[in-house]
Amino acid sequence: MNAAGPERYRWHAVPDEPSLRQAAYEAILAGAARAIHERGQFHLVLAGGSTPRGVYHALGAAKTDWSSWHIYFGDERCLPPGDSARNSRMAAAVWLDCVPIPPLQVHAIPGELGALQAARMYAETLHAVGDFDLVLLGLGEDGHTASLFPGHEWGTAPGAPDTLAVFDAPKPPPQRVSLSAARLSRARQVVFLVSGESKHTAVGAWRAGKDIPARAIMPAAGVDVLVESALLAPLDV
Ligand code: 6PG
């Protein structure tokens, strides 16, 4: 078992997707209130994919000091800016375009430039940013998170680049940009949102200590995993 042993993971079992959404909503607003109280700013990294969509939508009606929020993306798909499959477009459509976060504080990954250029530019954006207050992450069926895929570089080593250009991603589109595991781990809190039977095997592998990308995320404070309780049941092998 590596340094991130079981105690580094706090598994929060919830009965279903609506409860997961509610728990995530509360965790994000609590993280925002704490960061704004302590430092006057809240630096939040968004997960892509479909699981967080409902949470983002709910945040559109939240009461908070939006002027103190700073938004980043854990990964992006290299598609045109207006493409609805872009993680930044998804978040904007259901939430960010509906609340008064200053536009200069929403830092989309310029995926339209191609993985290499976009990764380079986003690394410059992150250069001036310290530890994130909260990082949200999803989990793929193969154990990937952000755009860190099995068999690809995850950027775990000290001194690893903040961003990685990803080619031949097994989940379309093939070209993506991801924050590295090391950069995603520079966070006061990391919360995974895991929902859907298709993730059962990956959760099992994770808890069995298998070397999947999700295990490469190792913030000092440990990791919180919001997960549907059915996915914690032993797999019928
Ligand atoms: C992406 C995501 C990816 C996602 C997982 C889970 O751009 O595809 O960042 O890491 O979080 O694949 O996706 P779902 O939530 O759609 O199951």
Image: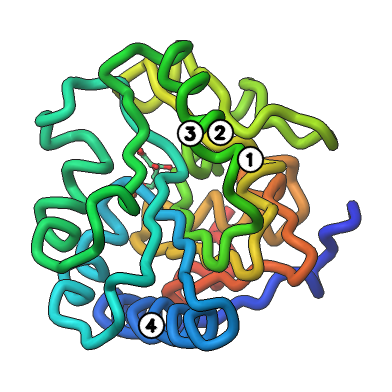
The quarter of the rendered structure image containing the N terminus is bottom right
Q: Name the residue under label 4.
A: 29
Q: Mark 3 points at which residue?
A: 147
Query: Dot 2: what SS?
Result: loop
> Horizontally, is 145 left or right of 114 in the view?
right
Report if the beta carbon of the residue with label 2 is closer than 8 angstroms to ligand 1.
Answer: yes
The picture places residue 132, in percent across and down from the top left corner, at 58, 59
Give the Cα separation between the discs numbered 1 and 4.
27 Å
The picture places residue 130, in percent across and down from the top left corner, at 64, 54
Q: Nearer the viewer, residue 199 or 65?
A: 65
First along the sequence among labels 2 and 1: 2
Q: Name the residue under label 1.
A: 213
Q: Do the residues labelled 2 and 3 touch (CB within 8 Å)?
A: yes
Report if the beta carbon of the residue with label 3 is closer than 8 angstroms to ligand 1.
Answer: yes
Three-letter code for the amino acid on which mark 3 is drawn: Ser
Give the Cα separation between the discs numbered 2 and 4.
27 Å
Q: Residue 148 carries which label?
A: 2
Does residue 197 lie above or below 15 as drawn? Answer: above
First along the sequence among labels 2 and 4: 4
First along the sequence among labels 3 and 1: 3
